[in-house]
Amino acid sequence: MRGHAGVACHGADLLGDQLVGGAFGARISRKFLVVVPGPHGSTLTATLARVSRAHVELLTRAGCTICEQVYDRLAELATELDFELSATDVDAAATAGNSALRAEFGDRLPVVLLNGREHSYWDVDVARLRADLARGRAVVDDDG
C-alpha cells in the first residue's frame, strides 16, 4: 500500500504531485494516481484538492472602534464563507520593526487584505468578498 499526503490507495502509485497557484494566491495541489489492480486493466485517476483556504487579514490599530466592528463582521463571514481570518496591528508591527504596513495603510484603517492583496478599506465590501471567494472556488471546481 502506497500513498501520499494522507492518500492511501491499495495498489496505487503516485505519478505526479504539482503545487500550482490558484485565484488570489490559493494553493492547489493536483495529484495524479495510477490504480493498477482491476478486471479491466489500469485506470488513470486524477484528483484535485485545495491545500489551503483563502486568507483574509484585517489591518488595524489599538483603540480603533471601526476596526473592531469590521473584525466582528469578518469573523461572522469567515464561518459562513470558509476563510482564515487574522488581524495585524500596524503600530505594533512598526514597533517590532515592520513599518511598511503602517506607512502604506495607516491612514485608511481598517484595511481588508485578501491573500495579501488590498481588498477594501474602512468597511467590508461583502458583495465583492463573496464574489472573489466564489471565483476562487470556481477555479478549483472547474479544473476537476
Image (cartoon, rainbow, N blue to C red):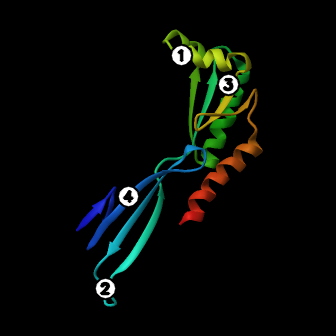
The first of marks 2 and 4 along the sequence is: 4
Q: Nearer the viewer, mark 1 or mark 4?
A: 4
Residue hosting label 1: 93
Q: Residue furthest top?
A: 95
Residue 1's image quarter?
Answer: bottom left
Residue 47's image quarter?
Answer: bottom left
The first of marks 3 and 1 along the sequence is: 3
Spatial CA span between label 2 and label 3: 58 Å
Q: Secondary structure at mark 4?
A: strand
Spatial CA span between label 1 and label 2: 57 Å
Q: Nearer the viewer, mark 3 or mark 1?
A: 1
The first of marks 4 and 3 along the sequence is: 4
Amino acid tagged 1: Ala
Q: Residue furthest bottom?
A: 39
Q: Secondary structure at mark 2?
A: loop
Labels 1 and 4 touching (C-beta < 8 A): no
Amino acid tagged 4: Asp
Q: Residue furthest left?
A: 1
Q: Position of residue 60 (x, y in %)?
A: 64, 21
Q: Nearer the viewer, mark 2 or mark 3?
A: 2
Q: Secondary structure at mark 3?
A: helix
Q: Position of residue 32 (x, y in %)?
A: 39, 66
Spatial CA span between label 3 and label 1: 18 Å
Labels 3 and 1 touching (C-beta < 8 A): no
The first of marks 1 and 4 along the sequence is: 4
Residue hosting label 2: 38
Residue hosting label 3: 68
Residue hosting label 4: 17
Q: Residue at x 34, y 55 (%)?
A: 5
Amino acid tagged 2: Gly
Spatial CA span between label 2 and label 4: 23 Å
Relative to 44, say whether 38 is above or below: below
